[in-house]
Amino acid sequence: MSQWKPPTQAEVERYFERLNNWGRWGKDDQRGTLNLITAEKQAAAVTLARRGRVVSLARDLTLHPALDYHMLCPVRRGNSRAAVDYVGMVYHGYTVTHMDALCHVEYRGTLYNGRSFEESIRFGGADWGALDAWFDGVVTRGVLLDVASARAEGYVKVGQPVTPPDLDDAAVRAGVSIEPGDFVVVRSGRKAYEEVEAAASPSVSTPGFPQITTRPGLHIACLEWLREHDVAGIAWDLMDERPVGYAGFDFGVHLGIPLLGLCLIDNIDPERLVTACAEEKRYEFLFVAMPLRLAGSTGSPCQPVAIF
């Protein structure tokens, strides 16, 4: 098999013409790739929940570093007492497990289906591509692609990103084929990476939203793979490779949001799923993810689960 070659700058520039899903489900569509999850697809996926074993893919929300503000205090109601919480967070970034809405990322001034970013994003809520279109959540077949297990270090390193052949190889090792409407869970080995190397990755701190300047993850060419396989979405632990490596591109696979209408679930913890798949001896499962019904929002914290 010939060695994989990354796309050229010109080839990446052509992703807009080659890959985008604008108009595929109508010019007013705001569901994007979740349109690929048909009623038939959901019905077939439900049959994968044979034993009732539920595995969470979410990271714990703790005061540091996920929550910007968490206040817990007792309150009195007559002769009784209760405890209540007040929580504040910026869930986009690298800590909170969350779903990105289609208004979250623009490409050259436009959102999915060609709507203007500036005209759509307003204080108080987005007029286009808000999370509202996905309030019913995701119910479909999920597959685990464990890229990290094939790396000598047990995780993806800076300068050695996840490539389309890596995703294909992970599917072969798992004994699964990728089908339209699937949600792919990609493990790049974030836990091991952060234990060993993350401290050496430079970042620029912004309250609640650190800007990581160097970080391993998926190569931007994985956009081609995602479009070719018509996946409904991706849940991942390390996310995009940074820097992207191409002039003029600040986002990598996150460009799947405006180009494909792709559903992304960022910052998952796939380690429990790795154990469960090994014990269940299968790498396909019912995948369910429900966001909060935050009207007009750019996304939401969520808890994706795999059910066997």
Image (cartoon, grey):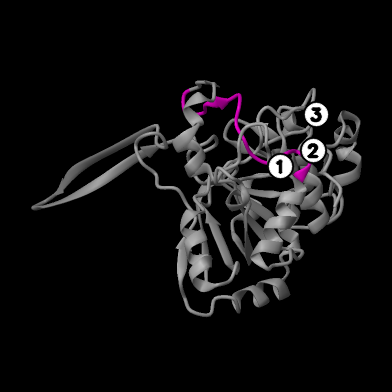
Identify residue type, mark 1.
Trp
Q: Quick check: marks 3 and 2 in contact, CB under 8 Å? A: no
Q: Mark 1 points at which residue?
A: 128
Is residue 106 in view?
A: yes
| Element assignment for label 1 | loop
Q: Closer to the camera, 117 or 252? A: 252
Label 2 or label 1, whichever comes before in sequence order: 2
The label nearer to you, 3 versus 2, is 3
Residue 199 among magenta residues: no
Question: How far apart are the alpha carbons under marks 3 and 1?
Answer: 16 Å
How far across and how far down the image is residue 231, in percent? 74, 57
Disc marking residue 108 = 3
Q: Which residue is drawn at 54% across and 25% down?
A: 201
Label 3 or label 2, whichever comes before in sequence order: 3
Q: In this view, does 16 lie to the left or right of 257?
A: right
Q: In this view, does 204 lie to the left or right of 34?
A: left
Graded by Cα atoms within 10 Å as few (under 14), some (14 to 19) or many (20 or more), the crowding at tag 2 reads some
How far across and how far down the image is residue 43, in percent? 66, 77
Q: Residue at x 34, y 36 (%)?
A: 63
Q: Name the residue under label 2.
A: 115
Give the image quarter of residue 111.
top right
Label 3 or label 1, whichever comes before in sequence order: 3
Q: Residue at x 75, y 52 (%)?
A: 32
Q: Quick check: marks 2 and 1 in contact, CB under 8 Å? A: yes
Magenta range: 207-222
Question: How far apart are the alpha carbons under marks 2 and 1?
Answer: 7 Å
The label nearer to you, 3 versus 1, is 3
Q: Quick check: marks 3 and 1 in contact, CB under 8 Å? A: no
| Element assignment for label 2 | loop
Q: Closer to the camera, 11 or 183? A: 11
Please, what is the dominant secondary structure of the magenta stretch?
Answer: loop
